[in-house]
Image (cartoon, rainbow, N blue to C red):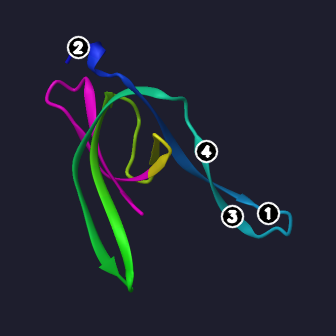
Amino acid sequence: MRAGRLDKRVVFQKQVKGRDSAGQPTNTWQDLPAVWANVLFVSGREYISADRQQQESVASIRIRKRPVTASMRVRFSGEVYEISAVLPDQSGEYLDVAVKVIK
């Protein structure tokens, strides 16, 4: 894949544990540096759950290889996506990150 196809900026986030002012444990999300990516929306659907209309979008995000895990999440185009799988490509140069968002 040529670098020109990595034409979108995405931000991976990792969960950070801390404590609030009362000393209670909290979890927050920390932004990692933005990376260039190719974003391909694979599917989408609408359905009813708990008497509410839900929308689900599934995408594949290709990035150059870096340390990414399924415990992270991705911010792209104003939405936060949950990572469902991190898959290396055959060359070992890129990662395909399967993500979804439910609204």
- For marks 1 and 3 on the same chain, the one whose residue lies earlier in the sequence: 1
Image coordinates of residue 31 in percent, x first then y, are 58, 40
Callout 1 touching callout 3 (CB < 8 Å):
yes
94 is higher (above) or lower (below) than 43: above
**Most distant residue in the bottom direction:** 51
- Residue at 54 percent across and 29 percent down: it is 33
Q: N-terminal of the two: label 3 or label 2?
A: 2
Mark 4 and mark 2 lie on one chain; the one further toward the N terminus is 2
Question: What predominant SS class does the magenta segment belong to?
Answer: strand
> Which image quadrant is residue 84 in?
bottom left
User: Who's the residue at 16% across and 24% down the image?
Assistant: 91
- Badge 2 is on which residue? 2
At label 4, which amino acid type do we have?
Gln
Quarter of the picture holding the N terminus: top left
Kindly identify the residue that appears in the image at 26 percent across and 27 percent down.
94
Find out whether residue 92 is within the magenta segment.
Answer: yes
On screen, 92 above or below 100?
Answer: above
Q: CA distance from mark 4 to mark 2?
A: 30 Å
Q: Nearer the viewer, residue 51 or 58?
A: 51
Q: Which residues are magenta?
A: 81-103
- Which labelled disc corresponds to residue 20? 1
The label nearer to you, 2 versus 1, is 2
Dots 4, 1 in contact, CB < 8 A: no
Q: CA distance from mark 3 to mark 2?
A: 41 Å
- Check disc 3 and give the amino acid type: Thr
Instruction: Name the kind of residue labelled 2 in the image.
Output: Arg
Q: Which residue is mark 4?
A: 30
Q: Residues within 10 Å of mark 1 (few under 14, many from 20)?
A: few
Residue 22, how many percent across, how many down?
Answer: 85, 69
For label 2, the crowd category at 10 Å Cα-Cα, with few meaning under 14, some 14 to 19 and many 20 or more, is few
Whole-angstrom CA distance, mark 2 to mark 1, is 45 Å
Please, what is the three-letter code of the amino acid marked with disc 1? Asp
